[in-house]
């Protein structure tokens, strides 16, 4: 084959090859690059205000995916939930794609303790290992990724308050607010192997008034088989505390208005015994990541009908571990199938899809993360749940420059006696 013939063949291939195939190197494994963790604040950060300045504010959008071109990426980079969003909201949903910035970090003390995998026990319901570390630095099965998410570093002695919203298709909103304190044991700072606990959490709804002082105490162990979750609620009407063993699995808090279950809080939490867990493997997907621009935008600009304002959300090409949970035949749960996407760097769940018993997608969920670099740690700035049947969406655990920062490591530790039924009653008041 002479040189001229070869050039003609190449030109013919380029002419008939779709643009997105030629452009693949922009969104390929090579474009992700190496990790460059941000381990401390930079000059623009002011600890006295509630802002987290964007370390990547000079980055430009490299591609916008919308209803006109999403089909080009359907088989390669988009998840089922994202495809459904384009199909359901073709006029408004889009994804602005930015360069990949692998900025996530944890305190050096966490890394120092992380040497080898922990041990799964009791059919994956429990974990034994070095408290304070990444439990499975070398994950090889589905529940390793789930446990890495559950036990990822996320503070020590915690206090915070945040709003939640439910937005209807016509733009009307239900607004709520809550307050929480927590004491985590799976960290290197107050690590306690003897306690056998993940942590303790007390929450209360402070708005709307009809739900005000609806207060809950949860004590979570490291083994749901040996020591199931313990929970109590305080009823402001009767001024009494009662045990609440039903606050688990698919229990739906009234504030969620039927959009999310209690085991969907923070992506996934609690016992895992109602599902068979399948590790689908590593994939490259476009995920909400380094969402500083969203964090720094006023809340009234964010809450648009159908979904959050996509102008302010950043997506990056991310390597994720994909896990499916399918309901066991002899178990019940209102979500028969879930597909979860875990960040390979930070172990955060970045998105989730839920399906009915016919395999039809029912909801898409996103958890945009930032590096809270004054800690350092990567966590979501909200959880967004998009319900396709009602076209409503729910925003939970909202963190923004408009909201006081969560205190992740209080100087004065919580008194462990607070996390009792009597302490719950005091917290409610």
Image: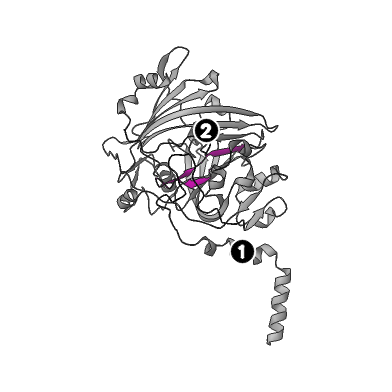
Magenta highlight on residue 71? no
Considering the numbered disc 1 on the image, is that residue within a helix, a strand or a loop?
helix
Q: Residue at the spot x=41%, y=51% of the render?
A: 105
Considering the numbered disc 2 on the image, is that residue within a helix, a strand or a loop?
loop
Q: Could you say where residue 210 lies in the image, as x and y percent from the top left?
A: 54, 18
Q: Residue at the spot x=43%, y=24% of the render?
A: 216
Q: Could you say where residue 410 lies in the image, as x and y percent from the top left?
A: 35, 35
Distance between mark 2 and mark 1 Cα atoms:
40 Å
Residue at the far bottom in the pictured view: 2
Residue at the far left in the pictured view: 194
Tell me: residue 3, above or below residue 142.
below
Label 1: few (<14), some or many (≥20) within 10 Å? few
| Circle nearer the N terminus (2, 1) | 1
Label 2: few (<14), some or many (≥20) within 10 Å? some
Tell me: residue 414, above or below residue 45.
above
Q: Quadrant of residue 339?
A: top right
- Residue 356 appearing in the image: no
The residue closer to the viewer here, 206 or 339, is 206
Q: Which residue is mark 1?
A: 24
Magenta segment = 367-386
Q: Which residue is mark 2?
A: 333
Q: Could you say where residue 275 lies in the image, as x and y percent from the top left?
A: 48, 39
């Amino acid at each position: 084959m002479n040189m001229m013939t070869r050039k003609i063949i190449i030109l013919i291939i380029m002419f008939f090859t779709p643009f997105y195939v030629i452009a693949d190197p922009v969104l390929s494994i090579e474009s992700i690059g190496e990790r460059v963790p941000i381990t401390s604040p930079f000059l623009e950060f002011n600890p006295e205000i509630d802002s987290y300045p964007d370390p990547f504010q000079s980055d430009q959008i490299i591609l916008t995916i919308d209803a006109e071109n999403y089909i080009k990426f359907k088989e390669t980079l988009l998840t089922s939930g994202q495809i459904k969003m384009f199909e359901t909201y073709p006029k408004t949903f889009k994804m602005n794609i930015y360069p990949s910035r692998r900025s996530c970090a944890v305190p050096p003390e966490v890394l120092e303790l992380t040497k080898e995998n922990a041990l799964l026990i009791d059919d994956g319901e429990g974990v034994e290992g070095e408290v304070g570390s990444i439990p499975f630095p070398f994950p090889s099965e589905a529940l390793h990724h789930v446990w890495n998410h559950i036990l990822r570093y996320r503070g020590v002695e915690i206090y915070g308050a945040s709003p939640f919203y439910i937005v209807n298709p016509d733009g009307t909103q239900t607004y709520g607010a809550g307050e929480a304190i927590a004491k985590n044991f799976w960290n290197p700072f107050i690590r306690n192997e003897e306690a056998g606990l993940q942590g303790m959490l007390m929450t209360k709804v402070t708005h709307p008034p009809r739900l005000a002082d609806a207060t809950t105490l949860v004590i979570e162990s490291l083994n749901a088989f040996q020591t199931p979750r313990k929970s109590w609620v305080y009823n402001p009407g009767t001024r009494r505390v009662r045990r609440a063993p039903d606050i688990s699995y698919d229990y739906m808090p009234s504030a969620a208005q039927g959009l999310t279950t209690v085991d969907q809080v923070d992506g996934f939490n609690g016992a895992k015994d109602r599902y068979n867990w399948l590790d689908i493997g590593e994939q490259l997907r476009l995920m909400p990541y380094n969402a500083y621009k969203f964090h720094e935008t006023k809340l009234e600009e964010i809450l648009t009908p159908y979904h959050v304002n996509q102008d302010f959300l950043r997506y990056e090409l991310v390597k994720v571990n994909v896990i499916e949970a399918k309901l066991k035949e002899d178990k019940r749960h209102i979500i028969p199938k879930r597909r979860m996407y875990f960040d390979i760097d930070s172990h955060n769940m970045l998105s989730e899809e839920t399906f009915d018993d016919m395999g039809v997608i029912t909801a898409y969920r996103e958890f945009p993360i930032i590096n809270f670099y004054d800690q350092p740690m990567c966590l979501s700035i909200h959880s967004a749940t998009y319900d396709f049947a009602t076209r409503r969406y729910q925003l939970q655990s909202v963190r923004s420059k408009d909201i006081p920062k969560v205190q992740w490591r209080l100087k004065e530790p919580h008194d462990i006696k607070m996390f009792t039924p009597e302490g719950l009653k005091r917290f409610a008041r």
